[in-house]
Image (tube, rainbow, N blue to C red):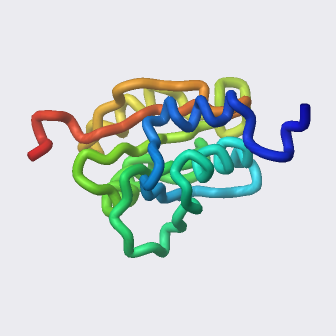
Amino acid sequence: MSTTAVPGEADRSTATKLGLHSGDLVLEIGYDDDCDEDLRAAIEAVTGSALLEDDTEEVVDAVLLWWRDDDGDLIDGLVDALTFLADGGTIWLLTPKAGREGHVEPSDIGEAAPTAGLQATSSVAAAADWSGTRLVSPKSSRR
């Protein structure tokens, strides 16, 4: 069975675990050549549209924020991602898994999220080399 023809069921399942649905608009920030192409393709297959770039003027349902340890200040990155997000939307912070170049310590995420006005709610193994942390606005601050 070829893994290059279409995203595999495992990739689609991961995209679905991210809470994405057909018609959702998803913004991608931090794309580089180390990002997982199968996950990106699976997200596009599930949502039915291409990932948007950070020059968009759209309000989006979710943001995929690929982040590595040397990408700068995580708080600033999260605040920037929030500017595109619809009320009730989700930021998926995708970071290299432990032992991979660019790994971000969970404690760094735990400190940055509340400072940016976000709460970490769950984590997933998003891809072979990437972990995903779901970040949302705390319920007490939602209107």
Percent x, y for residue 132?
A: 53, 33
Point 52% across, 34% down: residue: 16
Front position in the image: 76 or 3: 3
Is residue 42 shown above or below 83?
above
Point 37% across, 59% down: residue: 60
Front position in the image: 134 or 6: 6
Q: Quadrant of the N terminus?
A: top right
Point 73% across, 41% down: residue: 7
Q: Please tell me in which quadrant of the rendered image residue 95 appears.
A: top right
Front position in the image: 141 or 112: 141
Percent x, y for residue 27?
A: 48, 59
Percent x, y for residue 74?
A: 44, 47
Percent x, y for residue 53?
A: 54, 67
Q: Please tell me in which quadrant of the rendered image residue 46 appears.
A: top right
Point 74% across, 34% down: residue: 8
Is residue 13 shown above or below 87?
above
* Left or right of 86 in this view: 12: right
Furthest residue toward right: 1
